Image (spheres, rainbow, N blue to C red):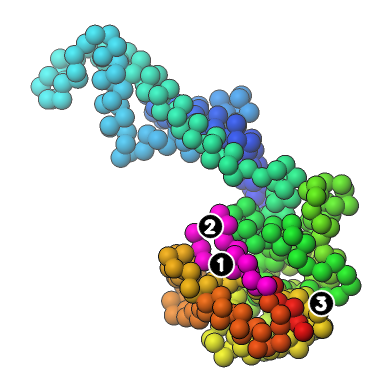
Amino acid sequence: MNRRLRELLYRLRTEADTPGRQAGAVGLGVFIGCSPFYGFHLALSVILARLLRLNRGLTYLAAHISLPGLWPLLVFGEIQVGRWLRGGGPLPIRPAELRHLDPWQFGVDLLVGSLIVGVALAVPLALLTWRTALARRKAPAIHDLIEETAYRYLESGMFHWEFARGKLRRDPVYLRILQRGLLPDREGRLLDLGCGRGILLALLVTARERLARGLYPEGWPPPSRLELVGIETSLKAATAARSALGAEADIRVASLLDAPLPPARAALLLDVLHYLPAPAQEELLGRVATALEPGGLLLIRDADADGGWRFTATRIQERACALARRHWRQRFHYRSAMEWQRLLESTGFEVDLSPMAEGTPYANVLLAARRI
């Protein structure tokens, strides 16, 4: 996919994305989808959304309320409404009686009924969209920070951009680390182990740039200035990270089981450890402890095996992701939050444990471990 096409798709996905305009796009699309102008819904959606400065893609998506499976029921209901408004009887459903219908009156009933049904469906669905979008809407400075960070991934393709944007908007760990100022702001190195696409590193770099421009969220501590190093097993993910971060971070492709770990002030293991066998988890944590300077920080986000139904949801989600990546035989090795804490303490850390699943159904916890 060339750059121009990616930019076009990006504009279609992000234009007019305020709650009010999203609601307007859904309402307009539903109204168009209920109209009897079949074959022209795409053109009507694009033209009217452009005139009203709404999201064209969302408008056309909402117009799919008239999908083939729903279309007959929708048309039948609209004709019945039209006939009822002019005092006519119910629409006959036997073929012999349908042959005697006046086609002009049939068309008028359909048109009038579609106007009523369109409004009746468009208004509540638009209100539902508005409420949902408003609940998910971040403060403007935070929203722009997320969008600017995700934009770094557009060069790698729409999938990487969508993935980064979705993680930043829905996964609480990224913004929470930044908002709480959990990472040390002094000289040294930050190791992101199993960094994937480097989303947290990209967020840190973008935060630094926005702080310099005076666009950083008010009241948030300044982002860490540590030197950024990421280690990732997947070449595909590491390539996306390199494209997003450029010279701002050193992204290395290596297995965590044997990759050399340079001295560091802080390290991250976000959603990584459960992919490793239990002995490998312990060996890796020992190597991280050796790499960290005294007082150095290790942040771990992983699942709590004692998390009840939330842990079940976590396991289902992880298995689904593994199957989507065609990792048919992927095995997971979970521990309870207390087991993670005891393991870290036995490795030479002091541990502070807090939940990290806000806004999600998962049993994730965040362990902030300082090397003694």
Near-viewer residue (169 or 44)? 169
Magenta segment:
352-367
Q: Quadrant of residue 247?
A: bottom right
Whichever of labels 3 and 2 marks the residue nearer the N terminus, that label is 3
- Give yes or no for contact between labels 3 and 2 (Cβ–Cβ under 8 Å): no
Residue beneath label 1, please? Answer: 364
Q: Which mark is residue 360?
A: 2
**Marks 1/3: CA–CA distance:** 24 Å
On the question of residue 41 being in view, the answer is no
Residue 96 appears at what percent x and percent y? 10, 22
- Residue type for callout 1: Asn
Horizontal side, residue 208 vs residue 89: left or right: right
Mark 1 falls on what kind of element?
Answer: strand
Q: The disc labelled 3 sits on which kind of residue?
A: Arg
Q: Quadrant of residue 74?
A: top left
Where does the image place residue 328, in percent across and percent down from the top left?
43, 76
Q: Is residue 336 left or right of residue 66?
A: right
Amino acid on which disc 2 is placed: Thr
The one of 181 and 38 positioned closer to us in this rendering: 181
